[in-house]
Image (cartoon, rainbow, N blue to C red):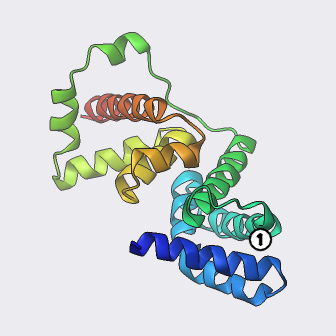
Amino acid sequence: MRLTDKMKNDEANIIHRIVKGETSLYEYFLDKYSQQVFVLIVRIVENQEDAEELTQDTFLKAFEHLSSFKAESSFSTWIYRIAYNTAISATRKKKQDLFVMDNAVLTNISDQQIDDTLNDESEERIGKLNEAIKKLDAEERALISLFYNEEKPIGEIALILGLTESNTKVKLHRIRKKLYILITEAE
């Protein structure tokens, strides 16, 4: 049995015991996943206080719906999905000034141009990249965060965001193009 399979079985056992009344065991999930969930949420909502509250909301929702967890995915994927939906709902309630890109502009950018720009790790370029990321909408920031910061595989990101794998790849590619344009416009 692989380690991930053992972990999945252990977590399924803990969930079963919690649902049967050993609610104090839920602390295991809080200890294991709260920091990761908080980091994802703060990257989406861009406000620490809101992220703290939304992290609590996420774990409360997960606890309330724990009996509906079917173990079709890992618990971490399930809790990330709840966190993502909670954070996106919160951002939709607030009006944001977002950057919208013309599709014609996006098609004229080569992958090599994007790679050259986004792989430049100079301090100045990283600063411009961080500013560009702030101009993305919450869903785009979430996708970027899950792929680059959390290093989640495309399949897991698709499950978390409720997309197909191919749609996830297309969105990631378009976001990279948007970041390229935002960075080059800032220069």
Q: What residue is drawn where x is 62% and y is 84%?
A: 28
Q: How many marks?
A: 1
Residue shown at the point (42%, 14%) measured from the top left: 103
Q: Specify whether 107 is left or right of 49.
A: left
Q: Quadrant of residue 14?
A: bottom right
Relative to 86, say whether 100 is above or below.
above
Q: Amino acid at mark 1?
A: Phe
* Residue 50 placement (x, y as % from top left): 67, 63
In this rendered view, identify the residue nearer to me: 53 or 15.
15
Residue 83 vertical placement versus 125 (above, below): below
The extreme top residue here reads 104
| Vertical position of residue 186 compared to residue 76: above or below | above
* Quadrant of the rendered image containing residue 150: bottom left
Instruction: Classify 104 as above or below 39.
Output: above
Between 1 and 164, the one lying in front of the other is 1
Q: Left or right: where does residue 79 sit relative to residue 123? A: right
Q: Give the quadrant of the N terminus.
A: bottom left
- Locate the C terminus and report the quarter of the image it occupies: top left
Which x, y percent locates residue 177? Answer: 33, 28
What residue would you read off at disc 1?
63
Residue 151 x %, y %:
36, 57
Relative to 148, is 168 on the left or the right?
right
Residue at image x 21%, y 27%?
111
Instruction: Kindly state the secondary structure of the residue where label 1 is placed.
Output: helix
Which residue sits furthest front? 1
| Relative image position of residue 88 (x, y in whole percent) | 65, 46
Q: Quadrant of residue 171?
A: top left
Q: Neighbour class for label 1 at 10 Å: few (<14), some, many (≥20)?
A: some
Q: Please name the residue shown 70% across and 87% down the image.
A: 25
